[in-house]
Amino acid sequence: MKKKYFLLPLLFLSVSFMAFMAVNYTIDSILQKLQLTGEDAKEYVWNDCSGCYFGYPMPGELKNTSMDERPLIVKAVGEFAKIYTKSDDFKRRYLEHRESSKPNPPQPPESMDEIKRKQKEELKKTIAEMEKSKSNIPASEKAEFEKAIEGLKADMAELDKSGDASDNSEMDQYMKQGYEAEMQDYKEKLQQWEKEYPKEPDMMIKRWLEEFLKVSSDVDFNAELSVDKLGKKRFVNSEYENKPDIWKLCFRSGKKTTEAARTFAEEWLKELK
């Protein structure tokens, strides 16, 4: 599938579609004009919704849709997105996304006795392997090799000497306290996860729609433009240049298109609530 950003489907045709002669738009005819398959469109809906961002396909030839046609197209695309978000495939992807966002519990700490036992096992294994390969070592290197083996044996003996039972018990208590603190943090994160990712995807869809409504709420459709030295159009009001891309897209789409998208989003939100 070609790499293209997919705008909130309520707007994804808003600035760049060829004029359609028919009034009765269907999603199939729209996708055909976009040179997209239904699977492509579903992928874009999922990516935008799950990421709560906005993108749109922009084939170069789709630029001349009239302002009167755009609200009809917005509605058709919006209905497609709504239907897909109710599908089993969308729910499956949501549950996978939900699970991947779930925090992982901390690992219970090992006792100092267990840690030392494992360290000794590793040392024994290393020493045995070195003893086995000693005969293959050049004579000029054997002294250093023997010295390394003796050093490992000394480390293993030190493990038996280091720390008495009370020291080990105190260290075990410190590690237990650390684990309990990590568990408390994990439980708080788990509660937050359950709140943000309920078993149904409605919350995720609501966040997506609410973000669009928030960003598009104050678009100044009467804003003046100027052309810079490179021939690029820019807002006379420099503050508008720092607005999000979706805000600028709503401006370019026009008031009718944006109002149609906002109306669709508001009605969709009412259904979700």
Image (cartoon, rainbow, N blue to C red):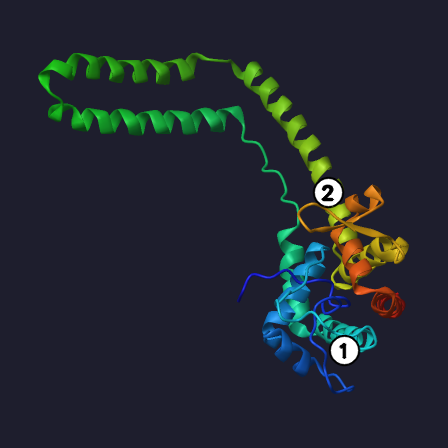
Mark 2, secondary structure of its residue: helix
Residue type, mark 2 in image = Lys
Residue assigned mark 2: 189
- Is 87 left, or right, of 250 in this rendering? left
Q: In the image shown, does 189 or 42 lie closer to the viewer?
A: 42
Q: In x, y percent, where is residue 121?
A: 36, 29
Q: Earlier in the sequence, mark 2 or mark 1?
A: 1
Cα–Cα span, label 2 and label 1: 39 Å
Which residue position is annotated with label 1? 76
Displayed quadrant of residue 259 = bottom right
| Residue most extreme to the left | 139
Q: How many marks?
A: 2
Q: Quadrant for the C terminus, please.
A: bottom right
In screen coordinates, is 191 left or right of 175? right
Camera-nearest residue between 192 and 31: 31
Q: Position of residue 110 (x, y in %)?
A: 54, 31
Instruction: Give left or right: position of 220 versus 203.
Output: right
The relative height of residue 256 versus residue 163 in the rendered view (above or below) is below
